[in-house]
Structure formats: C-alpha cells, structure tokens
Amino acid sequence: MSTLTTTARPAPGAAPSRSRTAVFVNGFGNEVHKGLIGLRSEWRGTLIQIVMFGLFYLLVVMFMGRGELRADLLVTGLLGMVPLTFIHEQVNRSFWSYLGDIQSGTLEQTYLTSLPSWVVLLGRQVASVVGALPYALAVFVTGFVAIKLNDADMPFDVQALVPMASIVVGTCGLALILSGLTLVYKRVEVATQISIALWFVAGGTFVPLVNMPDWAAFLSRAFIPIAPGIEAMREILLKGRSLTGLQDGWGLTWVLLQPVLLLLAGIVLFIGLERVAKRRGTLGRY
C-alpha cells in the first residue's frame, strides 16, 4: 500500500510568517523613520532653527566679551553651547513625539501591536539623537568659523569623545523621565521649558562649575546630564589634562557613572509611569 504525503501550503493571500527578530527590527526602523519625518519635511523650519542657535551662541559670547567676540570666550562657550543645543533638541524631540501621539489619538495604537514597548522606546530615542545632531553640528561649525576668523585654534583631543558620549547617554535618561511623565501628567510642557533655563544657567555651559557656589556646582554635577561632560571636555581641551587626571569635578568615574545612573533611572521611571497610564486607561487621554 502506498502512502500519500501532502505538503501544507499557505492559504491564498496569506502573508508569509517572519521571524520575531525581523518583526522587532522592522518596528524599530519604523519608529526611527517616523521620528525623522519632521526633520525632513520641515526643512525650512530646521534651517531657521539652526541659524538661530548659531546667532544665540555668538550673541552670548559677545555679551560676555562686552561687545567683542573674544577668541578665548568663543572656545570655552562653544564647548558649552554644543551640548546645550543637543540636549535641548534631543529631549524636546523625544518628549513631543509622545505628546504629539497623545494629542492625535494614535499612541494607543502603538500599544495594540505585538511589539514590546522597549522596541518603540529605543526607536524614538535613536530618532531623537539623530535628529538633534544637525543642530549641534551647526553650532559647532559656527563657532569653528568664528574662532578661525579671530586667528585662533580650536583644540582637539580624541579623549574628549568620552565625555561627549556620556552626554548623549545621560541626555537619553532625562528624555525618558520627561517622556514618562507626559504619559501620566498630560500637561507637563512647562517642565521642559523650565529645564531649558536650568541647563543654560546651571549646566556649566558658559560659566564653569568651578566658578559657581559649591552647593550649585554639587547639584549640577549630580543631576544635570551635560554638566560633568562639559567640565571634563574643558579640562581635556583647555587645560591639557588626561581622562584619568581630571581635577575640577569628580573625576572620570563620575563622568562615566552619572549618565548610566540617569539612563537607568529614566528606564525605571518610564516603565513605571507607562504601567500607571495603562492601568488607568489614559494613554490616549489629553
């Protein structure tokens, strides 16, 4: 007796199954692409903002120099203005991506998919970081040109990449905290606006932390993501110190540890606030 074997075939019109990894990668890519749509579609507004950030930097340096663009102030101010521009854009892009979805009523749809929330979270953070880089780069180019026009040199040391990376990581932690808050407390835009002033005044952007009162410098180094990184970059580039020989702040250990702690705090708080919003059923309420 012969045995008849048959091979199961997918039903007509059925989509081929994909691996879980492929689904995650596709969802992550969609979130990154969605986050960068505004940067591409509103390029005129982007150019205006880039110009305004550059002018703001020059005006602050001119004010500090009593009407002159002094080369020393241009250099030290640039080391503060580039991180300030980055944290402003990165945090706001992450925050408004969630608030925009809440206001448009599309945030709940994100949680109806099979994707875990961390995929969406990671995609939005990457999009925010990438979207903030052109603004920070434009300020750097503005400062570099101004420094060269003053017949000065822009110092460079590859060691400065370490505090720069720490700023990116710590800023992501702050963005997660504010994004989590907006899931539960729908009108927290004022928090982002106040924090901008806080970063500018207390982050060591134009006034080094060593010139601030001890209590203010302590709070800045402890809680502001850009403060330890800016202080370390100034020591490396302006004072010729090495990463292991930092003296003005709390050393290399804190430059590396603070952003990690902020990131972990951001992840824990975001997940906790996300669960609160789900439990209350308020993800799409504004």
Image (cartoon, rainbow, N blue to C red):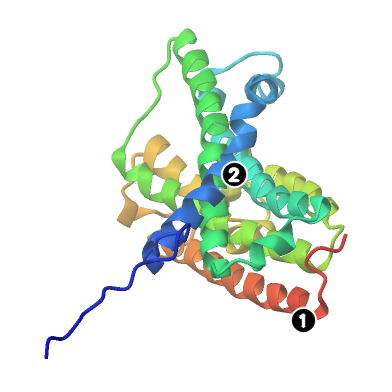
Residue 3 versus residue 187: which sits nearer the camera? 3
Question: Can the viewer see residue 248 in this picture?
Answer: no
The local secondary structure at tag 1 comes to helix
Q: Where does the image place residue 24, in percent across and percent down from the top left?
A: 45, 62
Residue at the spot 53% in from the left edge and 30% down from the top edge: 134
Question: Can the viewer see residue 9 in this picture?
Answer: yes
Residue 264 versus residue 185: which sits nearer the camera? 185
> Counting residues from the N terminus, which is met first, the one under dot 2 or under dot 1?
2
Residue 19 versus residue 160: which sits nearer the camera? 19
What residue is disc 1 on?
279
Q: CA distance from mark 2 to mark 1?
A: 27 Å
Type of the residue with mark 1: Arg
Residue at the spot 51% in from the left edge and 63% down from the top edge: 119
Mark 1, other Cα within 10 Å: few <14 / some 14–19 / many ≥20: few
Taking 24 as reference, is 138 above or below it?
above
Mark 2, other Cα within 10 Å: few <14 / some 14–19 / many ≥20: some
Decide if residue 184 is on the left or right side of residue 222: right
Decide if residue 141 is on the left or right side of residue 285: left
Decide if residue 151 is on the left or right side of residue 196: left
Q: Where does the image place residue 247, in percent across and percent down from the top left?
A: 42, 55
What residue is disc 2 on?
34
